[in-house]
């Protein structure tokens, strides 16, 4: 499927099998993508603001520069996804498996990542201001030059994370 820049705003795509789809620049704002299979899809610069992605499979998906602000992501699978410069601000990713996820430069300000597995994730240069990172796992996580000002780090162990140049309160 090749739908560069297509508008699918508000459309019902529950359970759709879109693995490997090219949805670059697509407008999927407010779309219902519950349980959709989007593994290995390209959603670079896609607008997913307010979309329902509950239970969707985005493993190995390319979401570079995508907007996911306010999207519902309960049970979404993002392991090994590429989210460079993506906007995940105010998104609830608590308890999610984000191991090996590439999120350099991502905006995660105000996001809830409590209890999330961020092992080996790349969060270099990410904006984590005011994020809830309590009890999150950071084994081998790259937080180089990340902004963690105002983040809740209660119970988080950063000893095995790379924090050179990171900004803390």
Image (cartoon, grey):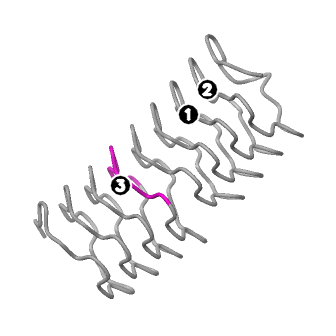
In this picture, is 104 found above or below 32? above
Q: Residue furthest top?
A: 165
User: Residue at coordinates 65% horizontally, 38% vertically from top-left?
Assistant: 119
User: Residue at coordinates 28% horizontally, 57% vertically from top-left?
Assistant: 46
> Dot 1: what SS?
loop
Q: Earlier in the sequence, mark 1 or mark 2?
A: 1
User: Residue 97: where, in percent of width, then height?
Assistant: 62, 54
Report the side of 8 relative to 127 (left or right). left
In this picture, is 71 found above or below 105? below
Q: Which residue is mark 1?
A: 127
Spatial CA distance of label 3 from label 2 is 25 Å
User: Residue at coordinates 39% horizontally, 38% vertically from top-left?
Assistant: 85
Tag 1: Cα neighbours inside 10 Å, few (<14), some, or many (≥20)? many
Quarter of the figure that contains the C terminus: top right
Q: Earlier in the sequence, mark 1 or mark 3?
A: 3
Q: Which residues are magenta?
A: 60-69
User: Residue 148: where, in percent of width, then height?
Assistant: 68, 29
Residue 51 found in image quarter = bottom left
Tag 2: Cα neighbours inside 10 Å, few (<14), some, or many (≥20)? many
Report the side of 16 relative to 76 (left or right). left
Q: Which residue is mark 3?
A: 61
Q: Which residue is mark 2?
A: 147
**Labels 1 & 2 near each other (Cβ < 8 A):** yes
> Dot 2: what SS?
loop
């Amino acid at each position: 499927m090749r739908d560069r820049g297509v508008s699918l705003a508000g459309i019902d795509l529950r359970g759709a099998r879109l693995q490997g789809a090219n949805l670059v620049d697509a407008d999927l704002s407010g779309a219902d993508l519950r349980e959709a299979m989007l593994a290995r899809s390209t959603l670079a610069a896609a607008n997913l603001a307010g979309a329902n992605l509950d239970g969707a499979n985005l493993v190995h998906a390319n979401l570079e520069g995508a907007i996911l602000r306010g999207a519902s992501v309960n049970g979404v699978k993002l392991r090994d996804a590429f989210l460079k410069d993506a906007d995940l601000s105010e998104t609830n990713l608590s308890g999610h498996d984000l191991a090996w996820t590439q999120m350099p430069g991502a905006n995660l300000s105000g996001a809830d990542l409590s209890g999330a597995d961020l092992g080996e994730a790349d969060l270099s240069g990410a904006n984590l201001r005011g994020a809830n990172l309590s009890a999150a796992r950071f084994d081998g996580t790259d937080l180089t030059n990340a902004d963690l000002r105002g983040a809740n780090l209660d119970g988080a162990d950063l000893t095995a994370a790379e924090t050179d140049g990171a900004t803390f309160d």
